[in-house]
Every structure is written in C-alpha cells, then in structure tokens.
Amino acid sequence: MINTIFAFLNAAIIQGIPLLYGAVGEIITEKSGNLNLGIPGIMYVGGISGIIGGYLYEHSTSNMNPFLGILIPFLSCLLGSALIALIYCFLTITLRANQNVTGLALTTFGVGLGNFFGGSLLSFFGETGSISLYKTGGYFKAALPFYKNLGLFGETFLSFGFLAYLAILVAIVSNIVLKKTRVGLNLRAVGENPATADAAGISVTKYKYLSTLVGGMIAGLGGLYFVMDYTAGAWTNNGFGDRGWLAIAIVIFAIWKPASAIFSSFIFGGLYIICVYIPGLSSSAKELIKMLPYLVTIIVLILISMRKKRENQPPESLGLSYFREER
C-alpha cells in the first residue's frame, strides 16, 4: 500500500511539471493584462522546436556532447516559443486584436505546426518511422546520481531530470520578482490599470511585450519537458492531450500566484492520473474522473468570486487592449 502511494506521488509530480511550466508562463502573461489562450499551442511549438534542434544535432555527429545535447534543444525550444508569443504580442498589443480569438487561433496553429513537423521531419531527410531521440532524451532524463541511496524518498522525489527542478525554481523566482521587485510592481500596475501606469511613466507596451514573451518561453519549456523527459525524446502527434488547457485552469486554481501553482500543478497532475490507481473502474467512470481538475477549477472560481478578496482576483484589465489615446 505504501509503495502504491509513493508511486502515485511520483507520477503526480511527473504529470504536474509540464502543467507548472504552462501555468507559471500564463500567470506572468496575465499579470500584464494579456489573456493568452494560445498556451497549449505554444507548448506544442516548444516541444517540436526542441525535437527539431535535438534531431539536427544528434544526426550531425557521431560523438555527442551531453552539454550541447541539452543546450541545443533547450535554446531551440525557447526560440520557437518566443516566436509564437511574439506573434501574439504583435496582434494583440500592437494591432489590438481580440485576445481570446488570437489565443485560440494560435493554439490551433501551434498544434497543427507541431503535428506537421512531427509527422514530416524524418521524411525531409529521407528517413521513415517516428522520431525517437533516445540519446538526447537520456540526457534530459538523467536523475541525481545519489537518489537510489535514499530509498523510497529518493525514488519518489529525487528521480527526475533537471527540467523538473528548474520548473520549481522558475516558479519560486517568478513569485519573488512579482512580489518583491520594482519590475514586478510595475508589471502588476500595468495589468491592473495601464492608463495609470502609463501616466506614471511606465512603458505599458514594453511590459506587455516582455511579460508575454517571457511567459511564452516558460510555457514552451513545458512542451520540451514532455517530449524530452516524459516521452524520452519521442514525438507523438496530439500526444500532449489537454495538458495546455489544464495549465490555464491552474492559473485560476492558484489565484494568479506562481508559488501556489507549484502544489496546484501537482494536485492537478494527481487528479489527471488518479483513475489509473483506482482498481475496478469502468471506462466511463475513468472519463468522469478525468473531469475532476476542471470541476475543481469551477468550484475555486465560484469561491473566489463570492469572497471578492482583491488579492485573489485576476488583474483588472485582463483581456482588454490598451490604446494610449483612449485614456
């Protein structure tokens, strides 16, 4: 029984890491007043960009360098994610397009782009089959060397690749920046009332662009974790499922706080796979249980709305475009 519980905790953390990246990226974006529903698409693009970078390096040398084997896919992921986020910025900030429609369009575009290159990449180089970067995936999955010496605790909490610990670090640093620094204060001011922030000399456009770009790159790392760590360097079309949407739901569950997103992501990760650990469930019962993360989000949203505590509310200008001449 105890082994099953620890195995479940380990699986919940594994499932929660890509959700954490997506949630923290969206929190940073939303703090500027931008509602980016393109996070699922950005995660796909981040994943396929890492796959492309890893594939080009792995097949260009017979003697791979572990450092470059990690760095090249990592930078490729950040670049691909940033480009998609930049498209969102240009459309919604510069052209003031509807944020909801733009985000949904980018999700469709990102998923399609990922599936296209995921299914066609090998054919571009005259190969057949599916993408499997076992060496590169092995570098990303490499765990702490001493975790087996710590017994059940080590196998449960210390057996992950570096991207898992990086996700927690990014969430903690993001929380500190948003709450304790001048940059975070200015960003929150832009999200709450961009007209007032503009009048105070804060560059609204700069903060919106930077927060959305940084948020997009962080979310893209969730896609990189999924393809390099979770699936060990293998790509499967539509393999991400609804994880991108769960990441957006976690933003509400974590009440727009990156630190809260850490445990929220692990909770959602556990809810996502808990049906596997409940014996005797029918297929229909499993599908109903998979609805739990969304049901919990709805309940939290209702409670937040009823309590009306300002610190637990979304940024006041969330989803609204800002035009200086309309102040």
Image (cartoon, rainbow, N blue to C red):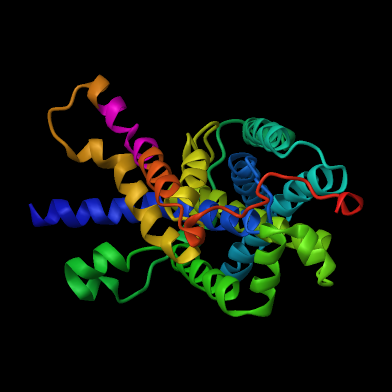
Q: Main secondary structure of the magenta part?
A: helix
Q: Which residues are magenta?
A: 286-296
State the image coordinates of residue 75 (x, y, percent, origin top left).
Answer: 68, 61
Q: Nearer the viewer, residue 40 or 117?
A: 40
Residue under the point 17% across and 27% down: 281
Residue under the point 51% across and 59% down: 310
Task: Examine the rendering and report whether any part of residue 61 can be seen.
Answer: no
State the image coordinates of residue 195 (x, y, percent, origin top left).
Answer: 79, 59
Farthest right residue in view = 325
Query: In this rendering, is residue 170 above or below 32?
Result: below
Task: Examine the rendering and report whether any part of residue 270 can be seen.
Answer: yes
Q: Would residue 178 be found to the left or right of residue 305 on screen?
A: right
State the image coordinates of residue 223 (x, y, percent, origin top left).
Answer: 55, 48
Q: Nearer the viewer, residue 180 or 19?
A: 180
Query: In this rendering, is residue 194 above or below 183?
Result: above
Residue under the point 25% across and 41% down: 274
Q: Would residue 245 be found to the left or right of residue 201 on screen?
A: left
Is 187 contained in the magenta span? no
Residue under the point 54% across and 76% down: 176
Query: In this rendering, is residue 135 above or below 176?
Result: above
Which of the 4 image quarters holds residue 301? top left
Which of the 4 image quarters holds residue 147? bottom left
Q: Would residue 196 be found to the left or right of residue 317 on screen?
A: right
Farthest bottom residue in view = 181
Is 290 contained in the magenta span? yes
Which of the 4 image quarters holds residue 92? top right
State the image coordinates of residue 215 (x, y, percent, origin top left).
Answer: 64, 57
Farthest left residue in view = 1
